[in-house]
Amino acid sequence: MAYLFETFEGWKAYCEKNGISLADSVLEYETQQKGTPKEKIYAGLEKAYSVMKEAVDTGFTQDMTSNSGMINNGAKKVYNYEKPVLSKEFQNLVARALSAKEVNSCMGRVVAAPTAGASGILPGVLYTLQELHDLTDQQIFDGMLVAAGIALIIERSSSLAGAVGGCQAETGSAAAMASGAIVYCLGGSYDQVFDAVGITIQCMLGLVCDPVAGLVEVPCVVRNASAAAIANSSAQIALAGLDSVIPADECVQAMAEVAESMETRYKETALGGLAATKTGQRIAKQVLIQDIEILPDEED
Ligand code: SF4
């Protein structure tokens, strides 16, 4: 009987009792609960990872200008800028997360992991992690399995959707998935993986969903970059042996509680936060006029 991904505590207990890794328990879940053969699961992961990397490369090589004009080839500028703030690796991480997310905002092909709005975080993090630590694709696929297990638990206890839980649920969950995957890939213990999840959620808690003009562009693209950075800082903290104090399960419960008390205007309605600012409103009006102008003439 496979583990059903209800709590992080239960997941750890199951793996310890059965002497299996976090990645293998997700694999077991997929094979037993869904009847998917192991080879097919790995083939799916391979495909997903290649689409993630392709999205990063597309953002760097093709024109990324969105219809609204709010997205305008930003990732290339960050990638090629001559002065790294911390290191070239950090600059690449930020640029890659921006790049894959810009592709989504410009209607290109991405992996919604866990959602399209957060589709830059795992690509930016995994691509950079593999390059820096010379990891094999197989190690990355196992990290993706762990990320999937983390998402399953967050989804059951809280939500992965900005429209339900605010941006904490969307970019916050993706960052938690990425952070857990980093720690797992770098040989962290069960506890360290879940501490990374808990620390990441603590850093993303309360973030509202307020897309300007209702488009998943601003602040979504830059939030993917900052979430990728937070995933890495949390992984660094957890790998060094610092615990999250508040266990990951309780952090997810806190996320659910915050989501419940969040007003509707902060849940992808484009009625609050940045969307409600003077500039946000002006852009929304412009986008609306553009949309009306491109409507087909009824007499045609
Ligand atoms: S602001 Fe809303 S739409 Fe944008 S990434 Fe966050 S949750 Fe998604």
Image (cartoon, rainbow, N blue to C red):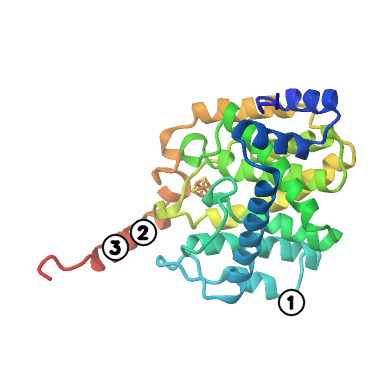
Residue 292, by quadrant, is bottom left
**Which residue is labeled 1 in the image?**
82
In the image, residue 294 lies at what x, y percent? 26, 68
Q: Residue at x 49, y 58 (%)?
A: 217
Closer to the camera: disc 3 or disc 1?
3
Gap in angstroms between the C-alphas marked 2 and 1? 34 Å
Viewer-proximal residue among 86 and 36? 36
Q: Is residue 66 left or right of residue 234?
A: left
User: Can see residue 235?
Assistant: yes
Q: Which amino acid, mark 2?
A: Arg
The quarter in which the N terminus is drawn is top right
Q: Residue at x 30, y 66 (%)?
A: 290
| Contact? badges 3 and 1 (CB < 8 Å) | no
**Which residue is labeled 3 in the image?**
291
Gap in angstroms between the C-alphas marked 2 and 3? 14 Å
**Which residue is labeled 2 in the image?**
282
Q: How many marks?
A: 3
Q: Is residue 120 left or right of residue 109?
A: right
Q: Disc 3 or 1, which lies upstream in sequence?
A: 1
- Considering only vertical position in the picture, is 246 above or below 214? above
Q: Residue at x 84, y 26 (%)?
A: 16
Say if disc 1 is inside 8 Å of ligand 1. Answer: no
Q: Which amino acid, mark 3?
A: Asp
Viewer-proximal residue among 299 and 88? 299
Q: Residue furthest left?
A: 299
In the image, residue 205 lies at what x, y percent? 63, 36
In the image, residue 82 lies at what x, y percent? 74, 76
Helix, strand or loop at label 3? It is helix
Q: Residue at x 55, y 58 (%)?
A: 110
| Contact? badges 2 and 1 (CB < 8 Å) | no
Residue 187, by quadrant, is top right
